[in-house]
Image (cartoon, rainbow, N blue to C red):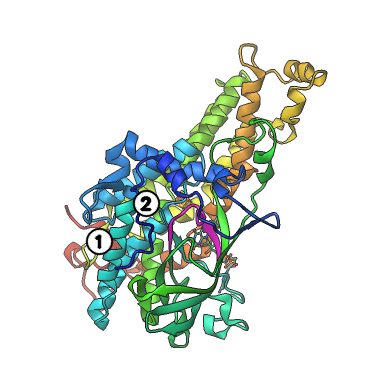
Amino acid sequence: MTTHIDSKLKKIVDGNDYINSLRNRDLEIYLFGELVKEPVDHPMIRPSINAIAQTYDLAIKAPELASVISPFTGERVSRFLHVCTSANDLVLQNKMQRKLGQNTGTCFQRCVGMDAFNSLYSVTYEMDEAKGTNYHEKLKQFLTVMHRYNFVVGGAMTDVKGDRSLAPHQQADPDLFVHISKRTKDGVYITGAKAHQTGCINSHWMLVMPTMRLGEGDKDYAIIGAVPVDAKGITYIYGRQSCDTRSMEEGNIDVGNAQYGGQEAMVIFEEVFIPNEYIFMDGEYDYAAMLVERFTAYHRRSYVCKSGVGDVLIGAAANIAEMNGIPKASHIKDKLVEMTHLNETIYATGIAASYQGFATKSGAYICDDMLANVCKHHVTKMPYEIGRLAQDLAGGLVATLPSEQEFTHPKVGKLLQKYLKGKADVKTEDRIRILRLIENMTLGRNAVGYLTESMHGAGSPQAQRIQIGRAMQLEYKKRLAKVIAGIEVAGDKEVLVEEMTGYFARVFKLG
Ligand SMILES: Cc1cc2nc3c(=O)[nH]c(=O)nc-3n(C[C@H](O)[C@H](O)[C@H](O)COP(=O)(O)OP(=O)(O)OC[C@H]3O[C@@H](n4cnc5c(N)ncnc54)[C@H](O)[C@@H]3O)c2cc1C
Ligand code: SF4
């Protein structure tokens, strides 16, 4: 297999290796109307790189939690590169995600790729079985290369989509969904754009996948392939985040979370070549729905990441109450309990989806689709309520604080130190730092990760309601009610536990 990889490259071990691996890649990235020379050194981009670096550092600090022994290379690699072969593997992904949310207070960007190749692993297996293709073996070869270098793989699913009521091939402009625009004996060329791509610039490779169920007319849109991030023909247009230029100012207080941030960009593909060995679907439109449904099952329970981020926000709210001298007030305690209850509800449904995981034909484990959708649906609401309560405890200063420059100003600095004091034994600066963190997570840069990504990432709320509706087994529930209400259920017999199908088969599975 050609790897398109510089033979001098070494395996990435820690966060520093990772950061250095991103240098000198000559990517075409636009930000503020200019080309970014070196993203690694850009003050607005760097916090998002630091967040991914944490995934490598956690793998060193807690190897059992954040790394695995690769079945392909026999060496230790990031858990983000692992294909789950047990329910416990799924559970450990969630535990790692919660810890990384706690360590960064933001999106650490690696789960889309992880969930993409976990779903691809079983879909390519079943496609090959049905169609006689050889995608699964090629995917394993690709994963071997990723493991060899311990790379970051991004997942590029969401197309820009144009008119949402039309299928890809019905759009006025065929490029509104990524599609095959040229074909040679060696591979295919793709054209189109993917929106909101988390961590794309911080990745080494991307898996490009269809965004939705496809029909026969969409055959050219049924393309899945792996593309190096620095492939010829790719343009990145960096997404702005609320208050993002604060990281380009002097000082490190107003930014709220100086070290870590998320990243999204639009990725535009103009005739980008994918060689045959990196193609994992080409025209099998009838398998696009299976891929999207399996991907969202994994990814919607990956949103337990938000419970880790929520831990930071709950901690910030508790700190500000203490700094204001009111930690014992009953309504404060009650609000912290409510925040924790909401946060643990997210975690509980996500981790349950993993514990209730099961084996696919390929041997890869997938989590419970119903519970994963319930988890993500909670995530579209609960972080907003947790954020509201954090702002309640913070007081109005969360939105009216003067800038860091005023605090160091020869005249007004002393006045602010005096008048913005909370409890006598708490430094005014510490109180300001906590308020800025709450601002950052509920109104600023990391509100993108904590709130809007919670709403739309892995699908907007309606997408989960559709899946929950499909799996809710209403006929079975209606029969239960009729039997208990004493209504005769004609020509029907009780479904025994061992005869259950769908969600309830998983609920009542013993052992
Ligand atoms: C911060 C962030 C990070 C993300 N990261 C990634 C990533 O790494 N990789 C990736 O592939 N994607 C990513 N996404 C994309 C995410 O999956 C999409 O935002 C989501 O699927 C919604 O698509 P959209 O943004 O185009 O919204 P729209 O599709 O425009 O949805 C807007 C509203 O219209 C409704 N709607 C849309 N279509 C229809 C229809 N046909 N009929 C009825 N109602 C409809 C929706 O339910 C929603 O209420 C990310 C998104 C965000 C916000
Ligand atoms: S939003 Fe959460 S699940 Fe998605 S990539 Fe970021 S950290 Fe991972």
Residue 179, percent from left and from top: 49, 78
Query: For residue 227, which numbered disc appears in the image?
Result: none
User: SS at mark 2?
Assistant: loop
Q: Amino acid at mark 1?
A: Ala
- Assess whether residue 201 is covered by the magenta stretch: yes
Residue 395 appears in the rendering: yes
Q: Amino acid at mark 2?
A: Leu
Q: Which residue is denoted by mark 2 in the rendering?
A: 9
Q: Residue at x 42, y 73 (%)?
A: 274
Disc 2 within 8 angstroms of ligand 1 (CB) = no
Q: Tell me how far mark 1 sits from mark 2, CA to CA.
A: 30 Å
Are there few (<14), some (14-19), or many (20+) residues within 10 Å of tag 1?
Answer: many
Check the image and name the residue furthest to the bottom: 217
Q: Residue at x 51, y 66 (%)?
A: 158
Residue 293, percent from left and from top: 39, 68
Tell which circle, 1 or 2, labels the residue nearer the N-terminal end: 2
> Looking at the picture, does residue 98 appear above or below residue 3?
above
Check the image and name the residue furthest to the top: 425
